[in-house]
Amino acid sequence: MSQILVQPEQKLMKPSQILRNTTIEQHHGHYSDKNGKFCALGVLMHELCGWDGKVYTNFMDLYYKMIERLGLNGCIGEVIVMNDDECKSFSDIADYLESVGL
């Protein structure tokens, strides 16, 4: 069973910081290409939960925990549109997240 790797008492990096600091290549259209590339939300899942982008067992549990812990509830749709429809870079998506305090 997968679990969140970051302990609750630890201070989490903001989602914008995670996207700015990742070395992972960006993918559009899916959470992962299953070969090491991730979309913006996939990167957050990878960095916070250790998700490998291949196994979807327990994915939704981890996904909702990640959203809740990062405070992404109100902006998931915009992040998805920016990544998949508009093909914005991680940096552009980080700019948006910073503009809403994330």
Image (tube, helix red, strand yellow):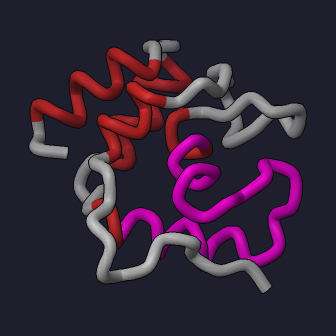
In percent of width and height, residue 86 lies at 46, 14
Residue 28 at least partly seen = no
Q: Quadrant of the N terminus?
A: bottom right
Residue 75 at least partly seen = yes
Residue 50 placement: quadrant = bottom right
Determine whether 25 is above or below 8 in the image.
above
For this view, does 102 lie left or right of residue 19?
left
In percent of width and height, residue 26 lies at 63, 21
In percent of width and height, residue 30 lies at 70, 37
Residue drawn at (46%, 14%) of the image = 89
Residue 28 placement: quadrant = top right
Residue drawn at (61%, 44%) of the image = 42
Is residue 62 one of those drawn in magenta?
Answer: yes
Determine whether 38 is above or below 1 in the image.
above
In percent of width and height, residue 19 lies at 43, 32
> What is the magenta range?
43-68
Q: Residue furthest bottom?
A: 1
Residue 10 placement: quadrant = bottom left
Q: How many marks?
A: 0
Residue drawn at (38%, 44%) of the image = 77
Query: Is 24 or 79 nearer to us in this picture?
Result: 24
Is residue 16 one of those drawn in magenta?
Answer: no
Q: Main secondary structure of the magenta part?
A: helix
Determine whether 14 is above or below 5 in the image.
above
